[in-house]
Image: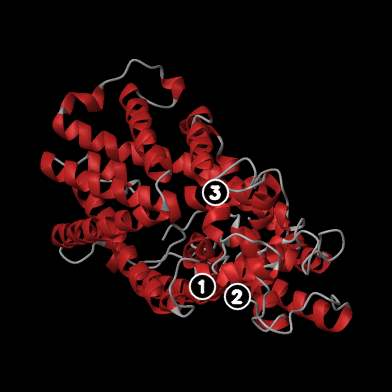
């Protein structure tokens, strides 16, 4: 909407963007739902057992920064809740303006940080109940805000009924493509996050629901902020997109408290598993890189520490270039998802050997643990998009032509299709990786009895449970894991 579109154009663009995202999310989720392994394990099949580490680091770094930044927004919701009980809390401050945060704000951030760190350490079975609670609570709260805004604006206001003000120099088609890329980029990381959750699915077909659910729910969700911002303009005379500021302006203290609480829970769920890489994917990443030293709980503690020591309120206030980079990182996520899908669906015909994914010298070792084909397919589209990303970060220092900007306006689509095509052509026609294909798919054992039989075939004389609980020696336990 900032480039001049109204809700009449934004809604179909939003639906189309989420529909495209839903297709890719369902494809990557199906891999994990079939073999019950997370992203750090799946990516070994395409990039190699050692070559996967830079890709894992790429996702985990973005997860750290985005989670730290979203802590500030969630702290704003908690500040709304506290000020609804004690109105003077909203004006409480003993910090200078250079701190970029008030005393009330930093206390709210620290309190929320404690909640977020605790919830991030919960096992996935308990997180399931949290997300059920989130769905039950947030949905009616979001719908109530939408109804309030519709009533206040008497049907929508200028953001809905106003004229379209597209820059003539850019044109409507390129502007629409840029808007579509923004919507796709919002959920681009979920295409590589989904395996971390889809691995727990009972059926390999479970992730297919995202193709329809994501565009429907995502589009309905986009309606509320449009109408709420129009209502804010009508009441307070200016446009305000930052939701904690909107809720903080409510005169009704119960409305301020309950709306702030619902949005806090929504942000907490988003931090754990939402469209940006969250704490659970970050835990999978670190445990995949350092399995001997870090598990998901320890990774959650490390992320919690970073969220405070990084002073994210300073990042929001001063690091506009970093925020521009984080907003444009979809140009990396698209090629990454493209390589993964091309490798699994086109090259390997959906056949993996899950045992070899855990063998550093096995089927997916390639050359010294690195698959150069995947990196060529990844960096060719990324290198074409880097100039556009650099311009979005520092437009005054970087000079690029219109063609580069047009290419960057659909960076995710260009990245995923180019990388998928390149990987397939290189792997099938130019330099096939000999000895890396499985004749049949090797799935993980479904029951303890299946794994006991596999252990006996390997020469072990103990069952899975006895080896895990009372290992006779350290080497046996390591070999089993």
Whether residue 352 sits left or right of residue 261 in the image: it is right
Say which of marks 3 and 2 sits in front. Answer: 2
Looking at the picture, tell me which residue is in the foreground, 127 or 61.
127
The alpha-carbon separation of the residues under discs 3 and 2 comes to 25 Å
Q: Is residue 35 visible?
A: yes
Tag 2, which secondary structure?
loop
- For label 3, the residue is 282
Identified at 31% across, 62% down, the residue is 159
The label nearer to you, 1 versus 2, is: 1
Q: Which of marks 1 and 3 is in front?
A: 1
Labelled pair 1, 2 in contact (Cβ < 8 Å): yes
| Quadrant containing the C terminus in the rendered view | bottom right
Which element type, helix, strand or loop, lies under badge 1?
A: loop
- Disc assigned to residue 27: none
The residue beneath circle 2 is 443
Residue named by callout 1: 446
**Type of colouring:** secondary structure
Q: Residue 374 location in percent, x, y?
A: 77, 67
Can residue 445 be seen here? no
Residue 261 placement, left or right of 378: left
The foreground one among 148 and 37 is: 37
Residue 43 image offset from top left, x and y in percent: 67, 63
Question: Residue drawn at (37%, 32%), measured in percent from left and top?
Answer: 109
Q: Distance between the residues labelled 1 and 2?
A: 8 Å
Disc 1 and disc 3: Cα gap in Å? 27 Å
- Crowding at dot 1, Cα within 10 Å, few <14 / some 14-19 / many 20+, comes out as few
In this rendering, the answer to whether 88 lies above or below 300 is above
Residue 425 vs residue 61: left or right?
Answer: right
- Foreground residue among 316 and 2: 316
């Amino acid at each position: 909407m900032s480039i001049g579109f109204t809700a009449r154009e934004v809604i179909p663009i939003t639906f189309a963007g989420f529909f495209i995202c839903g297709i890719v999310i369902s494809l990557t989720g199906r891999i994990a739902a079939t073999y019950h392994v997370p992203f750090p394990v799946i990516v070994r099949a395409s990039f190699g057992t050692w070559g996967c580490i830079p890709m894992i680091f790429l996702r985990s770094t973005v997860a750290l920064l985005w989670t730290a930044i979203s802590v500030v927004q969630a702290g704003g919701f908690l500040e709304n809740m506290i000020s609804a009980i004690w109105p003077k809390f909203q004006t409480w401050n003993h910090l200078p303006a250079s701190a970029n945060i008030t005393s009330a704000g930093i206390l709210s951030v620290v309190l929320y940080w404690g909640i977020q760190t605790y919830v991030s350490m919960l096992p996935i079975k308990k997180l399931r109940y949290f997300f059920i609670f989130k769905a039950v609570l947030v949905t009616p709260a979001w719908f109530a805000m939408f109804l309030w805004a519709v009533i206040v604006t008497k049907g929508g206001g200028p953001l809905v009924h106003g004229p379209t003000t597209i820059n003539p120099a850019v044109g409507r088609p390129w502007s629409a493509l840029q808007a579509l890329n923004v919507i796709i980029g919002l959920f681009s990381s979920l295409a590589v996050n989904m395996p971390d959750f889809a691995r727990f699915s009972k059926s390999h077909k479970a992730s297919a629901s995202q193709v329809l659910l994501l565009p429907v729910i995502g589009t309905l969700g986009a309606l509320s902020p449009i109408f709420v911002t129009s209502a804010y303009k009508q009441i307070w005379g200016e446009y305000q997109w930052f939701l904690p500021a909107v809720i903080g302006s409510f005169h009704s203290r119960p409305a301020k408290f309950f709306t702030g609480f619902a949005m806090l829970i929504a942000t907490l769920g988003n931090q754990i598993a939402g469209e940006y890489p969250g704490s659970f994917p970050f835990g999978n990443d670190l445990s995949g890189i350092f399995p001997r030293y870090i598990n998901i709980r320890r990774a959650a503690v490390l992320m919690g520490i970073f969220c405070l020591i990084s002073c994210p309120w300073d990042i929001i206030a001063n690091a506009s270039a970093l925020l521009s980079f984080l907003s444009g990182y979809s140009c990396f996520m698209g090629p990454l998802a493209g390589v993964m899908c091309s490798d699994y669906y086109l090259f390997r015909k959906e056949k993996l050997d899950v045992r070899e994914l855990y063998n550093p010298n096995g089927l997916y070792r390639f050359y010294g643990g690195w698959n150069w084909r995947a990196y060529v397919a990844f960096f060719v589209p990324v290198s074409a998009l880097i100039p556009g990303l650099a311009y979005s970060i520092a437009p005054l220092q970087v000079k690029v032509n219109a063609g580069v900007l047009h290419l960057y306006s659909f960076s995710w689509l260009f990245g995923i299709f180019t990388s998928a095509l390149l990987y397939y052509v290189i792997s099938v026609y130019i330099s096939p990786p000999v000895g890396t294909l499985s004749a049949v798919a090797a799935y993980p054992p479904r029951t303890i009895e299946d794994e006991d039989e596999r252990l006996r075939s390997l020469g072990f004389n103990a069952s899975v449970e006895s080896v895990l609980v009372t290992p006779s020696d350290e080497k046996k336990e390591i070999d089993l894991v």
